[in-house]
Structures are given as structure tokens and as C-alpha cells.
Image (tube, coloured by chain):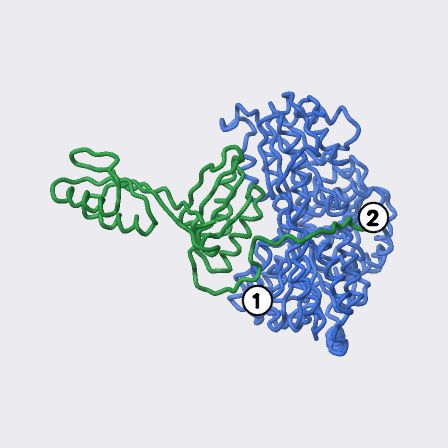
Chain colours: A blue, B green
């Protein structure tokens, strides 16, 4: 059945049909007809953000924590250009979001009209796909296809650019089931390759699971199957920043995060393993370190839904193209059918080696004196919140790495951080999106003061919608990671890496009507955190921490995994040679 | 956590060879890319090459199936085998791309290019030009008392060779279409 309606009505109808309950957006001239339709319905909640970048990050936070696509609605011109950072962020981290942009009317496109920009041109490289819809009759089918493309295969952001005359005009509404699409990525892995991997697992002496965001994106079943596989084989498992939570941090085979600021035992295991089973990770440069010294003696298997991720930077021996959940199910079945064999004796030796590495206790720190160590702040936060129904967001920098190191994640979709793009300003709006998807949960954004200020305007959004997001700011009055690199690589010349006039965060919170808490004494920290948790509303927690703390362990640029620096006494300056300094 | 509904069914194989042997030597490959004839699809393909730093030696595009709404882009590109595999995989993930064929590795193929040459001259040069054009099976499509426009079809190498010969004979301008290519046989 095709119904006639205006383009603006179609947008809202398609959102309802796609099961959307929340839209993050900011109105403007070119989307007024859509906002008029939103006003006249009750199925979809609209969250008015304070900046379009916030809308897109909020949609990302919503998507990552719920497993459903996030939706943002912005106007033409500056509305669309402000969305670009969020779109790129979602592309890098494979987050399914649908961003609707208004556009000047079709007859004015190309005339440099007021608030006109070439939205599809600008967003082409930072979306999985985008459309400029010039006919109202096609709008509904594009909307439905957009949700399909954003969520199938390797997920990603899509943009639908809708000229204002298309929103006003009347056309035929197409139901989702009437839409045909050729986009149908392969989800089942090649059974021969899966059998080859099962055989490799049977004979491996030093096996290791290296998991990533693809496990989370594949859905909860993928994490379940992964846990089953780890338990059945007894192999150790590490994960990238993006994959935290796919295997529980309390699980007995867990080695912790790997990579540049990953755990010693995880990185050493990556370097020394003889079978690396990459599940939904992409050999990012934060993980591999120096390519020619990356895990030199391992057979590498790689399960990925994106063919372009396979053999991109690291040549793999057993490539399996497919969806993680589908492949893991087949892999488990094949491995079980072959008799559940592993080389128990050698795997046991491997565990002895790993346990020796664990004794290094690379995350150890000493809280002494009257200044809060950031590691201590996060350890206390972990202790006091881990029993809650908890979601963690972060900004980008040292605090992000410390959060990954000192907080434990037991389930997928509980950890929202900007991994690929490294977007400062991501966490606060993302926490708003998470809280919208989980109104009763405890949502904490672990932030640095510099990152947090990048999208601080969203405090207005949190207040307007009564979202009790907790902003846990580790305030060192520095751009900590920049400062760390300047100390290590640029002769301690701290060029522009500190803020001379930071706001009084308590007063800033109060100016928005929120609660502010300041804490500078380690002895007061627990009480202050409890005060934050007990307050029913947004809290800005200004945690004054050690100003010159560096984030360790660290694999210096251009170094292999087995040349990690473990702490403040490490000879960092000599560790990083000029060829490493060129890398970021 | 709610488990996924996992479909049972036959595995379809990837269009890409996921286990190629890689060397460091650069190779030239001709790719045939069948795309949805949508606005912006060429920009997506070109943007991919520009954004990721791949080479385009030649590129042609035209609609090949009006009812099916399909265009064919023929790209000649150069890179190491690993880069060529990446290019094909990256092309394959563009939503509007239906099919990527590597004509260089998927069996024998034919490649042709069309070019127009404007050659100016009188006397011996003019006579030599038309004699060589005859040898190369180039057609005269425009003529004045002091110039010819030749139309020549062939491989890129043949057109290069013709250009070299015409250079001393008063070559003024060349227009080339870029390579069109098809696999041989069925």
C-alpha cells in the first residue's frame, strides 16, 4: 500500500517504521518542515543538542550502547559541516548512524544560496554511503535503504541530504518491505578456511585471541560465542581498545588490553605467540607498533567482515571473510566435531610464561602524598561503581588510556570511546546519547578537562532533558598526552600544552543549574565519588590530579612489542629514535 | 544478552583472492568496475584513489546498460600486488559498485583506446604523415590543405608509437579516450 504524504512526513514515518525512538538534532531553516512534523507526533523523542557535533556523537553513544542505529537531524550548510567530525568518527569506529541534513531547495542548489554547502560532496569520504534526494517519491525508499546500509556488513555512518522543497512536496510513501537492495555483504565464512584455523588451533603451542570492535559490532551473540570458545580452548585473550567488554575483564583467560598503552603481558604475548587469532580487529598502528617486528613468529588468522581490512597492513595466513558471530559459530562446531583438541602441555607452558609476565604488574602505582594520582582516582571509581548497571564513555588522551587500563568491562556495549579518529569532545555528548538509551543506568564520562571543554555546551542538553550523566574530569590543567609526548620527544618544550585560564568547574556546573564537585585530597575521594553517585542529576566532578603524571606502560613509536617502557624510570628519550618520532 | 538469529545456509565465496602472494614489484592492472549509474558514483571512485594515494593511469566511464541503470568504469592502475588487492577490496566496498573484475589476472583480455591526432604540415611531411597513418590503419576524419585529423584505434602502446612518429611531422594536438577493455572468450 502506498500512501501519499509530504516529504517531511515521510521522514518521520520512515523513522517510526525503522523503530527509531530517539533523534538528536538541531533545527534550522532547511529542516523546518521536518521539525514541524516532529512537533505533531509522540512516537519519537527529539533531543535538542547545543551543537551539531554533539548531536552526531550522541547518536554514536546511543548506537554503541544499544546496538541500534543512532539518528541525528541537522540543518543545511553549517549544520552539515558541524556534523563532519562525528561522521568521520563513526566511520573510523564502524558505528551505525543515520544523519539527516536539510538542504536548500533543489532549484537553488549550486547558486551559493544562504546556508548552502555541497553536503554530499563534503561527506562522501566520511560516510559509508550518502544520498541527495531530489524527488519526494524516492525519499522513503532511500530512508529505508539508509538504515539497511548503516547496519549491515561493516556498520558505518550514512547521510541523507534532503532539499527543503522535497520536504514540502507530496509523494508516495514506500514501505520498507517494498525496497530492493543489492547491498548484501557476505556473513558466512569459508568453511575450508575455518577448518584450517581449527587445525591450527589444535597444534598451536602459544595461541592467542586478539579481539576487536568487530566482536561488539557483530552483536551480543558474537561475545557469547567468543566466551564459549575461550572457555573451551583455554587460550589467552587480549583485546584492542575498541573490543573491551567482548570478553569479561574478570574472566580467567583475560590478559587485558594490548597496544601502545596496553598491558605488558598482552603485548609480550602478541610478540611471542605462534598462533594469532584476530577476531574483528584491524591491525591498527596503535596495536602493531613497528610493522616489520610485529609478532614475527606467528601464524596469523584474521576474521573480518571487510575484505579491505584483510592483508591491508599485515599479511595473514588464514583469512576468513565473514561476520564474527557466524564465523565463530562455525569455528566452534568444526573444532568440537574434530574432537576439541589442543596441545594442552605446551599451552600450559605458555600460560606459565604469561603468568611470569603478569608478575611484572605493569599497572602498579603508589598513591602517596596529598595529590591524587589519576590511576588512583580511576581505581576508586572502579571500586565504587563496578557493581552498578554502568556505562563508561571517555574523551581522548591520557585519561582515556587510564580508563581502559583501570576500569573493568564485563559486557559488550558498555564502553564508548573514540578509538580510530581520537576525537576530543566525543565523550560528553556520547554520554548523553547513552543515557537516552538507558535512562536508569549509571552513565559516567571519564574526561580530561581539555577534552571536556571542547563540547561543554552540551551541559545545557543534559539539564534540559534531566539526564544524570556523571562527568568525571581528571583535571591536570594540561593537555596531558601532548605534554607527555613533548616531554619524551621534544626536549620538555611544552609548546601550548597547558591552559592558563581554566574555568571554576563547580561554578560552571552551577551556571547551568547542574551540580559541581571538586576534590583534590585522596582522603576525600571516596566520599566525593559517593556524593556524585548519589546526586540525581548531571554532575561535573572536578578531580584535581597530579599534573605531570605520564601514561605507562608505553610502546614507543617505531618500537616492537617486546621493547615496552614500563614506568617513570624508563629511558624514554633514548628509546624513541628519530625514525619513530615521525609517527604520531 | 539475547542471542542472534543465525541463518544456516551455503557459503558464498568472496570475489577477492584473500591469500595472494605479495612481491614489492609494481604491476599495471586493468580493472573493470560495474557500477550503479547514480550521481556521484564516479566521484566516489576517484575520491577513493585520491584519498588513499593510489595511481590512476587511465580511466574511462560510460553507461553500458540503460535499462539496468549500469555504468562501466575501466581503470588502469599501477601498484604492488598488495596495493592492487587493496584497491579491488576498497572498490568492492563502495555501495554503488556491483562488481570488480581484474582483467589483468582473470584470463586473457582485449584492450583498446581511441585517439584523435591533429597534424599540420605541407609537402613531404604531409605525405609522410598520411603514409604512416595508412600503415597504422588510422582514418582521416578531417582535412584541410595544411592539416589532417586522424582517428586511430588500438592498444595504448600502438597509440603511443603513432604519437612518436607524428611528432616530427607537425603533430599539434592529441585527444585520447583512455582504455576500454573486455575479457576474451565466454
The percent coordinates of residue A536 (x first, y second) are 86, 43
Q: Check disc 2: other Cα within 10 Å, few if <14, some if 14-19, many if 20+.
A: some
Which numbered disc covers residue A442? 2
Name the one closer to the observer, A155 or A264.
A155
Residue A559 visible to the viewer: yes
B164 left or right of A83 in image: left
Tell me which chain the residue with mark 1 is part of: A
Q: Is residue B136 above or below residue A241?
A: above
Check if mark 2 and mark 1 are on a common chain: yes
* 2 or 1: tag closer to the N-terminus: 1
Q: What residue occupies the far front of the structure in this picture?
A: B186
**Is mark 2 in CB contact (under 8 Å) with mark 1?**
no
Name the one closer to the observer, A111 or A156.
A156
Q: Residue at x 70, y 39 (%)?
A: A457
Name the one closer to the observer, A359 or B50.
B50
Q: Check disc 1: other Cα within 10 Å, few if <14, some if 14-19, many if 20+.
A: some
Residue A584 visible to the viewer: no
Q: How far apart are marks 2 and 1 (CA)?
A: 39 Å
Name the one closer to the observer, A342 or A394.
A342
Tell me which chain the residue with mark 2 is part of: A
Q: Is residue A367 above or below residue A321?
A: below
Secondary structure beneath dot 2 equals strand
The percent coordinates of residue B56 (x first, y second) are 43, 49
Q: Quadrant of residue A401?
A: bottom right
| Front label number (2 vs 1) | 1
The percent coordinates of residue A521 (x first, y second) are 80, 58
Q: Name the residue under label 1.
A: A290
A387 left or right of A417 in image: right
Q: How many numbered discs, if any?
A: 2
Q: In this view, does A50 lie above or below A37?
A: below
Q: Which residue is drawn at 84% across and 49% down?
A: A532
Amino acid at each position: 500500500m502506498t500512501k501519499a504524504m509530504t516529504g517531511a512526513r515521510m521522514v518521520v514515518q520512515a523513522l517510526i517504521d525503522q523503530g527509531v525512538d530517539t533523534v538528536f538534532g538541531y533545527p534550522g531553516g532547511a529542516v523546518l518542515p521536518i521539525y514541524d512534523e516532529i512537533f505533531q507526533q509522540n512516537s519519537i523523542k527529539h533531543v535538542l543538542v547545543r551543537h551539531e557535533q554533539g548531536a552526531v556523537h550522541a547518536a554514536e553513544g546511543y548506537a554503541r550502547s544499544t546496538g541500534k542505529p543512532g539518528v541525528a537531524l541537522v540543518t543545511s550548510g553549517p549544520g552539515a559541516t558541524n556534523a563532519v567530525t562525528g561522521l568521520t568518527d563513526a566511520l573510523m569506529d564502524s558505528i551505525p548512524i543515520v544523519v539527516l541534513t536539510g538542504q536548500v531547495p533543489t532549484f537553488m542548489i549550486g547558486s551559493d544560496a544562504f546556508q548552502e554547502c555541497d553536503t554530499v560532496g563534503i561527506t562522501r569520504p566520511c560516510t559509508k554511503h550518502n544520498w541527495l534526494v531530489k524527488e519526494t517519491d524516492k525519499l522513503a525508499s532511500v530512508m529505508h535503504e539508509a538504515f539497511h546500509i548503516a547496519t549491515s556488513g561493516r556498520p558505518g555512518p550514512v547521510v541523507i541530504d534532503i532539499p527543503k522543497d522535497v520536504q514540502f512536496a507530496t509523494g508516495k510513501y514506500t514501505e520498507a518491505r517494498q525496497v530492493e537492495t543489492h547491498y548484501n555483504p557476505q556473513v558466512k565464512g569459508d568453511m575450508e578456511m575455518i577448518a584450517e584455523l581449527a587445525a591450527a588451533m589444535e597444534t598451536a603451542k602459544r595461541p592467542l585471541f586478539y579481539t576487536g570492535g568487530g566482536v561488539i559490532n557483530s552483536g551480543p551473540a558474537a561475545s557469547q560465542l567468543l566466551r564459549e570458545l575461550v572457555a573451551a580452548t583455554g587460550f589467552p585473550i587480549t583485546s584492542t581498545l575498541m573490543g573491551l567488554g567482548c570478553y569479561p575483564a574478570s574472566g580467567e583467560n583475560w590478559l587485558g588490553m594490548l597496544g601502545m598503552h596496553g598491558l605488558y603481558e598482552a603485548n609480550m604475548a602478541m610478540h611471542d605467540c605462534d598462533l594469532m587469532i584476530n577476531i574483528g580487529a584491524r591491525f591498527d598502528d596503535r596495536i602493531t607498533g613497528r610493522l616489520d617486528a610485529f609478532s614475527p613468529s606467528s601464524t596469523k588468522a584474521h576474521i573480518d567482515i571487510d575484505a579491505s581490512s584483510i592483508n591491508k597492513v599485515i599479511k595473514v595466513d588464514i583469512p576468513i571473510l565473514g561476520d564474527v558471530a557466524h564465523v565463530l559459530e562455525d569455528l566452534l562446531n568444526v573444532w568440537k566435531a574434530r574432537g576439541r583438541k589442543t596441545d594442552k602441555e605446551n599451552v600450559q607452558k605458555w600460560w606459565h610464561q604469561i603468568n611470569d609476565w603478569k608478575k611484572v604488574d605493569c599497572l602498579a602505582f603508589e598513591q602517596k602524598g596529598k595529590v591524587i594520582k589519576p590511576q588512583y582516582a580511576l581505581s576508586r571509581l572502579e571500586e565504587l561503581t563496578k557493581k552498578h548497571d554502568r556505562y563508561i564513555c571517555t574523551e581522548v588522551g591520557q585519561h582515556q588510556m587510564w580508563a581502559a587500563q583501570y576500569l573493568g568491562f564485563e559486557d559488550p556495549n558498555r564502553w564508548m570511546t573514540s578509538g580510530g579518529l581520537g576525537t576530543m569532545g566525543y565523550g560528553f555528548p556520547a554520554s548523553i546519547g547513552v543515557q537516552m538509551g538507558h535512562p536508569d543506568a549509571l552513565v559516567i564520562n571519564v574526561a580530561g578537562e581539555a577534552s571536556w571543554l571542547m563540547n561543554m555546551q552540551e551541559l545545557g542538553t543534559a539539564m534540559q532533558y534531566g539526564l544524570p550523566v556523571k562527568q568525571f574530569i581528571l583535571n591536570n590543567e594540561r593537555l596531558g598526552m601532548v605534554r607527555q609526548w613533548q616531554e619524551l620527544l621534544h626536549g620538555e618544550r611544552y609548546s601550548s600544552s597547558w591552559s592558563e585560564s581554566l574555568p571554576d568547574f563547580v561554578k560552571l556546573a552551577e551556571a547551568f543549574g547542574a551540580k559541581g564537585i571538586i576534590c583534590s585530597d585522596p582522603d576525600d575521594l571516596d566520599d566525593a565519588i559517593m556524593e556524585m553517585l548519589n546526586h540525581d542529576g548531571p554532575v561535573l566532578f572536578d578531580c584535581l590530579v597530579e599534573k605531570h603524571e605520564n601514561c605507562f606502560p608505553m610502546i614507543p613509536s617505531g618500537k616492537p612489542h617486546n621493547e615496552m617502557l614500563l614506568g617513570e624510570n624508563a629511558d624514554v628519550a633514548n628509546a624513541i629514535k628519530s625514525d619513530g618520532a615521525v609517527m604520531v | 544478552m539475547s542471542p542472534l538469529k543465525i541463518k544456516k545456509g551455503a557459503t558464498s565465496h568472496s570475489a577477492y583472492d584473500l591469500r595472494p602472494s605479495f612481491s614489492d614489484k609494481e604491476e599495471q592492472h586493468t580493472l573493470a568496475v560495474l557500477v550503479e549509474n547514480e550521481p556521484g558514483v564516479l566521484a566516489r571512485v576517484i575520491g577513493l584513489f585520491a584519498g588513499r594515494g593510489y595511481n590512476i593511469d587511465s580511466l574511462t566511464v560510460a553507461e553500458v546498460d540503460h535499462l539496468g541503470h549500469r555504468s562501466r568504469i575501466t581503470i588502469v592502475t599501477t601498484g604492488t600486488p598488495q596495493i592492487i588487492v587493496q584497491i579491488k577490496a576498497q572498490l568492492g566496498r563502495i555501495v554503488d559498485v556491483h562488481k570488480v573484475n581484474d582483467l589483468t589476472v582473470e584470463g586473457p583480455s582485449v584492450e583498446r583506446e581511441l585517439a584523435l591526432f591533429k597534424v599540420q604540415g605541407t609537402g613531404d611531411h604531409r605525405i609522410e604523415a598520411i603514409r604512416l597513418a595508412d600503415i597504422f590503419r588510422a582514418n582521416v576524419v578531417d582535412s584541410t590543405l595544411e592539416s589532417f585529423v586522424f582517428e586511430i584505434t588500438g592498444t595504448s602502446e600502438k597509440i603511443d608509437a603513432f604519437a612518436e612518429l607524428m611528432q616530427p611531422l607537425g603533430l599539434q594536438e592529441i585527444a585520447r579516450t583512455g582504455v576500454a577493455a573486455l575479457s576474451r572468450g565466454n
